[in-house]
Amino acid sequence: MLYVYHGSDEKVSRGKLHRAMDSLQKRVPYAHILRVTEEDEDAVSIKDILESQGLFHAKHIILLDRALSNKSIREDVFKHLKEIQESPHVFFIYEGKLLSLYEKKLSQYAEKIEKSEKDEKGAKIENAFALANAFGSRKRPETWVEYRKALLKGSAPEALHGMLFWKVKDMLIKGRCGNREDEYKKILGVLAEMPHKTRRDGVELEYALEKFILSL
């Protein structure tokens, strides 16, 4: 029997895996549990696992924890998928993002396959607002960290520049600059000019914006 948990939202995916394994362990408390990782290439044979039997219970629980990234283990697993499907032992596969080819192959034999994906759009928006708030508070280290995180999440420098420009303009309109209004007006001016200046000077907006953040 085979269950597969994978996807980009690894926290959610692993949580589902643990709940499924905990539920199974309550039903078969004496089952032997074996965890296999990508480093166990020389220590594990799927054929041997399939033919093995526990001392107190015939059923084993086998967790292949990110093991498919190892080519040798992956080929061994795929070679025995039919036997795994028909086995009294319960196999759990946990992976991050699976190639669609592997997902399709596993889905043919899995009793259950669950894919948990992150809301990338929501993550980008969340990072952008965290960046804007840090920038508005003039917290330079935090602003830089959030800027780099937003870029790594896939946000475009142009979008982040627009978010910062909007934040400063909003603060000025709503009178939230305290006694530093002139300072924020200057920042707004620099941000307004930045896209034109970077094109004129042949500088990437990403690096110009990062330099500006670190100069605050």
Image: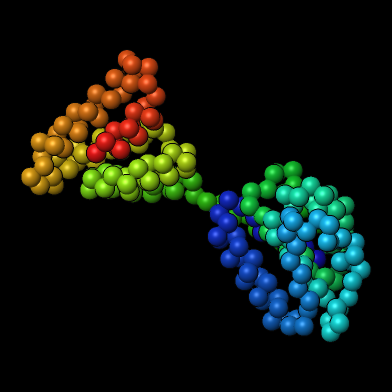
Query: What percent of the width, then of the height, locates residue 198?
Result: 33, 21
Q: Going 87% across and 60% down the picture, which residue do you hit?
A: 45
| Residue 21, image quadrant | bottom right
Q: Is residue 215 left or right of residue 115?
A: left
Quick check: 193 left or right of 23? Answer: left
The image position of residue 6, as x and y in percent, is 65, 55
Which residue is at a point 79% across and 51% down the rendered structure image?
74
- Percent position (x, y) of residue 109? 80, 57
Q: How many marks?
A: 0
Above/below status of 175 relative to 21? above
The chosen color scheme is rainbow
Q: Is residue 185 left or right of residue 32?
A: left
In front: 148, or 87? 148
Splitting the image into 4 quarters, where does residue 90 fall?
A: bottom right
Quadrant of res 66: bottom right
Residue furthest top in the image: 200
Image quadrant holding the N terminus, namely: bottom right
Q: Quadrant of the C terminus?
A: top left
Query: Left of 206 or right of it: where is 176?
Result: left
- Residue plotted at (75% across, 81% down): 28
Task: Look at the picture and state if 48 lies above or below 160.
Answer: below
* Most foreground residue, 140 or 84: 140
- Residue 157 to residue 23: above or below: above
Q: Position of residue 210 (x, y in %)?
A: 35, 34
Can residue 4 be seen here? Answer: no
**Residue 73 in sight here:** yes
Against 75, is 185 above or below? above
Q: Residue at x 75, y 62 (%)?
A: 36
